[in-house]
Image: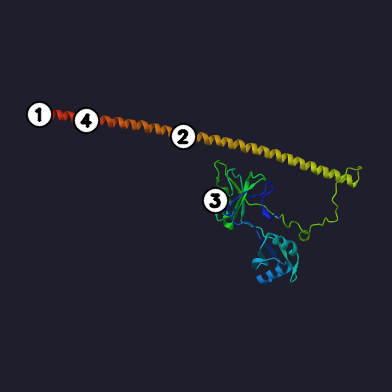
Amino acid sequence: AMASRAHSNNGGKLHQTGHHDAAEFGKTGNHKIFVGNIPSNTTQKELSDALTSRLPGVSVKECWVSPGNYAFILLDTRYNVIRACQELDGIEMLGRQLRVRPAYKNTAIKVLDIPSECGNRMLMKAFSIFGEVERAVVATDEKGNSLGWGLVEYARKGGVTKAVAECRERPFLIGRDAVPVRVELPIQEDLDVGMSESEMVRHRLPPDSDVEPRFPREGASGTTESLEYNLALAWREMADRQEQTKAEQEAKHKAERASVKEQHRRILEEHLQQLRLIEERQREIERVQEEERMRLLMQQQQAMLVMQEQHRAQAEQARLA
C-alpha cells in the first residue's frame, strides 16, 4: 500500500526512478503511529505489550508515551502501521477507547516552481542551508518528466520554519533562470486507512450503508427519481463549468508565466551582452594603453641609445684632440 503522504491536490506523484545514490533521498519511510486517549499512567511496556498481543508478528521499535494521554510508536514496517490503524483504532484499553492513526511527519515543506534542471540531489543541497534535510524528492510523471514541484523533509521543525520564513521574505533561486521557488506547508492526506467506519462514528457522520449506489434516470415529472436526476445533472454541469474555467485559468497563467520567463530571459541576455561589450571595450582600452606604453618605452630606449652614441663620439673627439 502507498504510504500516507503529504502533498497538495494539483496532480502528480512522487516517483523515484532510475539508479540513485542513497544520499540523494536520505531516510525514507514513515513507520510511526499515533495512539490517543490512552489510560493515564500507561507505561511504554504496557502499551507495547498490548499492541503486540493483538497484532502477532508486529515488532515495536520504539515507544514514546506522553503525559497528555497519547503516544507515538515506531513499528517495523509500513504494512504493520496500516494493520495497527485498521485493527486497533476504536478498541478499549482499561475502559478508554483508543484512537490509532498514522503519525504524520510535520517537518516537510512543499517546493513549487522547481526548475527543470533540478533533481533530487540539487534540491536537497539547496534546502540544506535552512537545516538538516533527511529527504528531498522532485515529483515526476510516469515518464520521468519533472512536474515542477517536490517535497523536502527536515530532521527538525526548525528547518521548516526557517525555510518557509526566508523563502517568503526574499526570493530564493536554485536554477539558471531568475524564477524563485515558492515554499508552502503540504496538505496531509491519508490514503492508507482513510475514512473507516469507526472514524465516521467518531465524527458523528450519518452512515450511508443503507443507501444503494445508483444511476438516476430521467422519469416522469414530479417523481423522486426525476428530481434526483435533474439535481444530479445540474450539479455535474456546474462542476464541468468550474473545471473548464479552472482549465482556462491554468492555461492563461501558464502562458503568462511563459511570457514573463521569456521576457526575463531576454533581459538577462541583453544584460550579459552589455557586460560582454563592456569587457571587450575594456580589453581594447587596455590593448591601446599597452601599445602606447610600448611605443613610449621604445622611444625612451632609442633616445638613450642616441645619447650614449653622442657621449662616445664626444669622448673619442676629446681623446684625439
Amino acid on which disc 2 is placed: Arg
Q: Position of residue 140 (x, y in %)?
A: 64, 46
Q: Position of residue 35 (x, y in %)?
A: 69, 64
How far is mark 1 from mark 2, CA to CA? 63 Å
The mark that comes first in sequence, 3 or 4, is 3
User: Dot 4 corresponds to which residue?
Assistant: 305
Q: Characterize the local packing of mark 3: few (<14), some (14-19) or many (20 or more) Cα atoms within 10 angstroms.
A: some
How far is mark 3 from mark 4, CA to CA? 65 Å
Q: Characterize the local packing of mark 4: few (<14), some (14-19) or many (20 or more) Cα atoms within 10 angstroms.
A: few
How far is mark 3 from mark 2, CA to CA? 31 Å
Does the residue at mark 3 contact the one at mark 4 (Cβ under 8 Å)? no
Q: Secondary structure at mark 4?
A: helix
Q: Characterize the local packing of mark 2: few (<14), some (14-19) or many (20 or more) Cα atoms within 10 angstroms.
A: few
The residue drawn where x is 74% and y is 61% is 86
The mark that comes first in sequence, 1 or 2, is 2
User: Dot 3 corresponds to which residue?
Assistant: 125
How far is mark 1 from mark 4, CA to CA? 20 Å
